Amino acid sequence: MSTLIRSKAPLRISFAGGGTDVPPYPQERGGAVLSVTINKYAYVSLLPADDDAITVHSLDYDIVAKYHGETDLAYNGELDLVKAAIRRLAVQKTGLHLFLHSDAPPGSGLGSSSTLVVALVGLFRHWLRQPLTDYQIAELAYQIERVDLGIKGGMQDQYAAAFGGVNFIEFTDQ
């Protein structure tokens, strides 16, 4: 019997400083944000599979997608955040079923896309038994979203989702 693994990360409300975390602003002038996470989440569940396929069930988009290898994981605008996390953490070498759901849709202003990536990284960290700290999870989620996929944006969402609670985060050029 396979073990179901679950992960969740909290969504956030930003009170001040939004935009000061978006490059190049923090490198040029420094920045600071104040946010708090709320009791709304992005959820991810993983069930290992007996075959080599990765099946992703997005409950929010009512999409079921099946991938069989690296070439199937090409970025095409559909579930790219999930594909990028799978590729970055080298999960594509084994079969699994992923189930995704968020209490808020992307574009809600609550950091839902970044929160989903943090939940995915946390899930894979547990499943692969990788000793990542909250800082490393946030940084890895940032790299997946901003570097691997080239999605414009700042850093506060990943750190708020990884740490939870009330966060005052300062950004510098160092």
Image (cartoon, grey):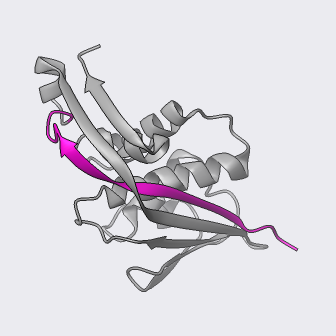
- Seen at 16% across and 42% down, the residue is 18
Q: Along the line of sight, which residue is nearer the eye, 157 or 58? A: 157
* Residue 56, picture quadrant: bottom right
Up-down: is 4 above or below 140? below
Residue 19: percent from left, percent from top? 14, 40
Q: For the N terminus, which image quadrant? A: bottom right
Q: Is residue 152 visible?
A: no
Up-down: is 118 above or below 138? below
The answer to whether residue 36 is left or right of residue 34 is: right
Q: Along the line of sight, which residue is nearer the eye, 49 or 17? A: 17
The residue lying furthest to the bottom in this view is 62
Up-down: is 4 above or below 15? below
Residue 13: percent from left, percent from top? 28, 53
Number of numbered discs: 0
- Seen at 31% across and 71% down, the residue is 105
The residue lying furthest to the top in this view is 174
- Seen at 36% across and 36% down, the residue is 167
Residue 159: percent from left, percent from top? 40, 39
Q: For the C terminus, which image quadrant? A: top left
Q: Along the line of sight, which residue is nearer the eye, 12 or 157? A: 12
Residue 10: percent from left, percent from top? 44, 56
Q: What span is colored magenta in the figure?
A: 1-21
* Residue 7, picture quadrant: bottom right
In magenta stretch: residue 27: no
The residue lying furthest to the right in this view is 1
Q: Is residue 7 visible?
A: yes
In magenta stretch: residue 20: yes
- Seen at 46% across and 81% down, the residue is 59
Up-down: is 47 above or below 64? above
